[in-house]
Image (tube, coloured by chain):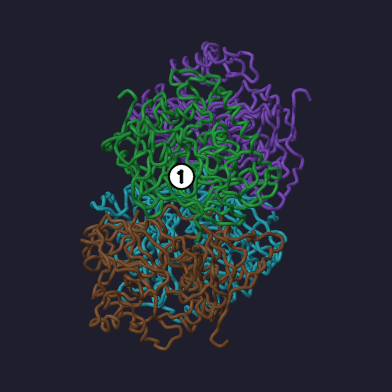
Chain colours: A purple, B green, C brown, D cyan
Amino acid sequence: MPQNIFPLDSAKSFAEQEKLGHNRWHPDIPPVYTVKPGDTFRVDCREWFDGAIKNDDSADDIRDAPLHKVHTLSGPFRIEGARPGDLLVVDILDVGPIPQEEGPLAGQGWGYTGIFAKKNGGSFLTDQFPDAYKAVWDFNGQKATSRHIPGVEFTGIIHPGLMGTAPSPSLLKTWNQREAALIATDPDRVPPLALPPEPNGAILGGVSEQDFDRVASEGARTAPPRENGGNQDIKNLSKGTRVFYPVFVDGANFSVGDLHFSQGDGEITFCGGIEMGGFIDFHVDVIKGGMEKYGVKENAIFMPGNVEPRHSQWLAFSGTSVTLDGEQRYLDSHLAYQRACLHAIEYLTTFGWSPEQAYLLLGAAPIEGRFSGVVDIPNACATVYLPTDVFNIDIRPGAGDPPQIDAGIGAPHSSFNG
Amino acid sequence: MPQNIFPLDSAKSFAEQEKLGHNRWHPDIPPVYTVKPGDTFRVDCREWFDGAIKNDDSADDIRDAPLHKVHTLSGPFRIEGARPGDLLVVDILDVGPIPQEEGPLAGQGWGYTGIFAKKNGGSFLTDQFPDAYKAVWDFNGQKATSRHIPGVEFTGIIHPGLMGTAPSPSLLKTWNQREAALIATDPDRVPPLALPPEPNGAILGGVSEQDFDRVASEGARTAPPRENGGNQDIKNLSKGTRVFYPVFVDGANFSVGDLHFSQGDGEITFCGGIEMGGFIDFHVDVIKGGMEKYGVKENAIFMPGNVEPRHSQWLAFSGTSVTLDGEQRYLDSHLAYQRACLHAIEYLTTFGWSPEQAYLLLGAAPIEGRFSGVVDIPNACATVYLPTDVFNIDIRPGAGDPPQIDAGIGAPHSSFNG
Amino acid sequence: MPQNIFPLDSAKSFAEQEKLGHNRWHPDIPPVYTVKPGDTFRVDCREWFDGAIKNDDSADDIRDAPLHKVHTLSGPFRIEGARPGDLLVVDILDVGPIPQEEGPLAGQGWGYTGIFAKKNGGSFLTDQFPDAYKAVWDFNGQKATSRHIPGVEFTGIIHPGLMGTAPSPSLLKTWNQREAALIATDPDRVPPLALPPEPNGAILGGVSEQDFDRVASEGARTAPPRENGGNQDIKNLSKGTRVFYPVFVDGANFSVGDLHFSQGDGEITFCGGIEMGGFIDFHVDVIKGGMEKYGVKENAIFMPGNVEPRHSQWLAFSGTSVTLDGEQRYLDSHLAYQRACLHAIEYLTTFGWSPEQAYLLLGAAPIEGRFSGVVDIPNACATVYLPTDVFNIDIRPGAGDPPQIDAGIGAPHSSFNG
Amino acid sequence: MPQNIFPLDSAKSFAEQEKLGHNRWHPDIPPVYTVKPGDTFRVDCREWFDGAIKNDDSADDIRDAPLHKVHTLSGPFRIEGARPGDLLVVDILDVGPIPQEEGPLAGQGWGYTGIFAKKNGGSFLTDQFPDAYKAVWDFNGQKATSRHIPGVEFTGIIHPGLMGTAPSPSLLKTWNQREAALIATDPDRVPPLALPPEPNGAILGGVSEQDFDRVASEGARTAPPRENGGNQDIKNLSKGTRVFYPVFVDGANFSVGDLHFSQGDGEITFCGGIEMGGFIDFHVDVIKGGMEKYGVKENAIFMPGNVEPRHSQWLAFSGTSVTLDGEQRYLDSHLAYQRACLHAIEYLTTFGWSPEQAYLLLGAAPIEGRFSGVVDIPNACATVYLPTDVFNIDIRPGAGDPPQIDAGIGAPHSSFNG
């Protein structure tokens, strides 16, 4: 069984570990370990906020979450012989929460979902949900339940939210330039349009003291997905998946983090998956010259595994690219998906859940979000599919009255004013 | 078995049929037939261009397609007792091509996919594919193959692209106002931002002569999906599906058309499903007061059927919201899906398909398009999933060279200059 | 679309049709039509009892069913160029009930399931259910419901119960000899061990008058599956399936019949599928020398289609090879499956269904029957899986009391004594 | 995460562990641990032969396997408050091989499949395969490959082969009496009809010295499945499964063992799953009076989990109840399944696998075995389904020649004669 090449001690912070990971992308962060094509190995991952979020009934920790410290990534791992132009083949053999531990760290038998406040990160529906909310989930084998969202239970589709290879110097430069140009269009926007490099809070693995300030001031933030993979938040990268990453630097320098016990398509609450730390087992290989051979010059391609949770009945909601104020937008799928999600939330409230409970659920449960019509001017059509077996009551529309759940203590709430 | 309440004679044009349908949305188009809640019935549907597209090896018909004449809709069908505020429950019992006919009309054993030219409608990737292209598909039981795209064969996910209820006068007014406002922002754009009412080519069912001009000048075009359902192009509305439509006028006045033998999520080539005429069997019912009761005040909700084609292995491509020119856009899922589709197209060309063959295939085959990350500023992440069993060769990346197909005669091409 | 090469007129009996089928297996029954490899064609099928079973609330017709007249088979169809030693490739393109007809013939919008009486055919559990019972099912699109079995509704897995190629003279002789030897071990058994050739009621297609008596006295009964396929009653031979049949005579002489709207594994009530007439569309091809090349010298092999109804939750029952009297049998899977089915029946009665309703349901619904342990001396273990979405109530075991259905008028019953 | 209440040290034999399990069924074996309804806990399991089978290229260990020592069971575990007449609800939360260990014990990264020799246990096809064979499988995450069976790779469907509750004294007596009666009909048969109590090799947990001989002479062997569950070898009892066991003694006294990394329906090679040790996580509950309430008086019922490996294409083989010698048997499903399996084996040999490689594969891979026709006198019809994605080559029949694999070193073989 796989050797753990990046063990983490749950009693220590991410920065205090024997092997130090990183939370910025930079080609000069040296590999923490070298493996060979064909190797199988295990890596521990810390939850993305390194323990800042608690298993309690307050959302203050979500409101005040230290975004400059994310994501705590394990790696980089050098793959011997990988060269720029190759494709790195990554098999996810297994992935799960921290084995056999109970405790205060997410992944020790529990995880959380958060709606981020508009003033601290925001979320997909931040105009409708400007405050912070939290839901804590308990793991019971493959399944999750929450005292903050009664009446639901589902099998997790466990996956890493973030995996990727290191950028080359020129690719990093491209990122920083294009993102700076975007920020410059509205530098004071709340929430911001993008996050520039931020030395404060940077963890840079084995970068030497003399290089630290330079690398910290250049290192790309880990929030967005980019050409190297990164924070793609694809829920289907679960066990059994094979991913093909472009290689931009010698050795590929692969990193991983941001494990989720489950997630809906889009991770719509921002911190929308069920966040946790845990372990992940990999097998790696290299396709020489694969970027050119297969035309995969940027952005990972992948084959999802064959052991995803099976669902057979779905209730789906649609939305189009008209704003809540009635303004017609031109083929805006992003807006259409927002509208579809808002429709789903409004629907669920007729059964007794609060809007924020419904929103948290859509971020955490294995919902599917699809592009349904992208050419029928002027309206894009997007759809969101809820597996009906997530719910303990029958949520299908019928002639009678919708059954009512007891919303319980509700989702913890925290605002900057209150 | 269900009575056919809207039969079509394949030897006659849509306007010459005994029962006349319509191709605009308007509350004043009278019902062509009345059914009761609980009734089961069959409706024939004409392909959306009423026979203008031929089973041949030229794309001139796609280039010159008469967009002002679409969509040829069957209906409206009045459901006795349905009132504004109700939900209309529509079960799709069965749907298929024209039974037991062979001939020149799409649906008579064949169908087509078209990439529309930028100057006549455009498509999802119109900047990369400005000309017109066509692929003709032959139906063999549940499966489709094309002489224009060798090396692929797949089971159709047959569905109606367009179903919906009639708008109320005020809803129609809202549509026309908001779309006019959008058009006014760039009235000469090619392709246009939206399509205003167009009396030329209007077919209005039983509208009286004295009302015709008024209704024709007010009637909303059928291209976009809207609050009433409409041209949603949701591939999963296949047999066994139950849809819930808001009711805006007495009797609901339900219409249907634009059948597809198959389609990928997004119908990305504009005429991207495999277009055909055929039949559809319905069961209808009404949930009194359902719009309020379930919070479904606009946009249909639905439960997909349980007999969709089964696939177990997928190859997926991702894209982010960076333009081809390298410009960073803010959380633009529409762009991210374009980039994911372009990645898939580039990948498929390494096996010998031309870019337009690959594009046509993505429009027609049962690909899935998903919102994967919608909050990770500044990059949205979208993914497109191709079922690998669509291909006669193994398209998975490997250490050897990609196997090469014979692209054959290619996809017919037609441009306005040539 | 496919030409119908074997049309049936629902107003006439099977023997009065323009093209005459057959109800015995014999190499001397001449082909009724010749097709070529690569051809696509439609065939109508009559329900297996040619209309003897009625859409009413009596089981007398089941009690007195004329077993000597079954199965009414369409064919034989000669495939040009097929020779003994080849494999006949049969694609089921589509299959369904009689299109667009309502009426008194099974397949005209309805079908039936019967438990045969011990004195007339018997069934899998004939010792526990010695009398005749019937359930009539109404078809609503893809779904079936029954006034005789309230509380259930399911999507049909439509398939032909019986397809096969003609036996060679020597193969027919083998059949007759080995079955006669079995009958001879207990010739008076009720129900019989096997059915010998029976001239009474024989329909032999185009057999000439001079050959009729001979062929009728030699022709094998169609009840059992044999080397040529035959009455395999495999529910998964639904649309999209490809079957490979051994060819024993020039032209293969392929026949088909016994359509089912649905069936559980084993067709345990004997007349256990939902019996109906209808149509089936085929594509045929030939693999030259395929029997030797693939080692398929007897018994069809097949690949099920990919559009079977999807189920995701099952409740399963197990049984072992101990008789109801407590006698231990040695690795008897047949008995173990009987015990598993009896357990399922007993379970369902706790919800209010009568034992015969439960038994009829297991024969008709898409249950799965599996060999689970066949080597663990002395007990075989068999399991039967019920998809829980068949039931309108929640049939899963829980802490509360089982919900009770209203069993309604029950299943019609008829016995020889009463 | 769950506490391990039955840890095993891989460096010690089963009898030397701190907590002692058992290998016989008897009500007087005292519980090794007590849990409460609602509890979650982990249990380690030793592979069924306690390390007698080696990771090498000889089948001598299979030939000489010590059958009197099996199965090494973990338990019994007492569930507080469970009383005879209740149903014990067992959720399998997780199950897998020995975590993070490599070594000589099956489960430490590898497992094995064996065909048992006719003179030592036999197998489902023992007349055709009278000698011993072995295949060793390597685990790579969720997947298994074997140096003894090249050209195949599949995702394991991990499950416990054996779980059950303790028999009451009267139930144990029933077992011993009915099995003795069977043995008495042919006491010298090879392989035997059943296995009587065997004091030699008995491990009886905490049974006191004074009771040991009595209990050892009464204790039922663990090979067969019985009313208490037992060695059911149901491959679908994988993670996420809920099983309902009848309770026959106070506390239920639940035991578990015989983990399999994978298995085909029937476990046809006798030692047919991929045998291994490992861990299993349970959640337990009790339904008071459930045996009567749900009519579950014997034999477990269960609901399979929703994370089983997904397959979408199958190649199926059928068999009927005619012996290889041509003798017609009456509705013998056991024989029909043997014939179906033999057909599958013969088919696979046309691709280059040896018959014993094919046989071992059918025992280990997730094949499905179904009862297809159980009433069509005189022939039962059974079918076996092979997922085509198990094979690295395309095994579907076609017009060309079957591709040939390199059978490699083959499956180790050992006979009693040489």
Q: For the C terminus of chain B, which image quadrant?
A: top left
* Residue C226 picture location, percent across and down: 34, 71
Task: Say left or right for C79 vs C152.
Answer: left
**Residue C107 in sight here:** yes
Q: Check the image and report above or below for C122 versus A99.
A: below
* Residue C306 picture location, percent across and down: 42, 52
Local packing at callout 1 (Cα closer than 10 Å; few below 14, some 14-19, many 20+) is many
Q: Nearer the viewer, residue D337 or D139?
A: D337
Q: Check the image and report above or below for B72 versus D289.
A: above
* Residue D300 picture location, percent across and down: 58, 64
Q: Nearer the viewer, residue D139 or C146?
A: C146
Task: Say left or right for A161 vs A148.
Answer: left
Residue drawn at (56%, 34%) of the image:
B219
Q: Does dot 1 land on a helix, a strand or a loop?
A: strand
Instruction: Say which residue label 1 marks.
Output: B259
Q: Check the image and report above or below for A230 versus D356.
A: above
Q: Check the image and report above or below for C325 versus B245.
A: below
Q: Nearer the viewer, residue C67 or D407?
A: C67
Task: Say left or right for D178 vs D387.
Answer: right
Residue at the far front in the pictured view: B210
Amino acid at circle 1: Leu
Q: Nearer the viewer, residue A58 or D17?
A: A58
The number of callouts visible is: 1
Which quadrant would residue B401 be assigned to in this image? top left
Which quadrant would residue B115 be assigned to in this image? top left
**Residue C370 in sight here:** no
Residue drawn at (69%, 49%) of the image:
B288
* Residue A126 picture location, percent across and down: 66, 27
Question: Which subunit holds the residue at mark 1?
Answer: B
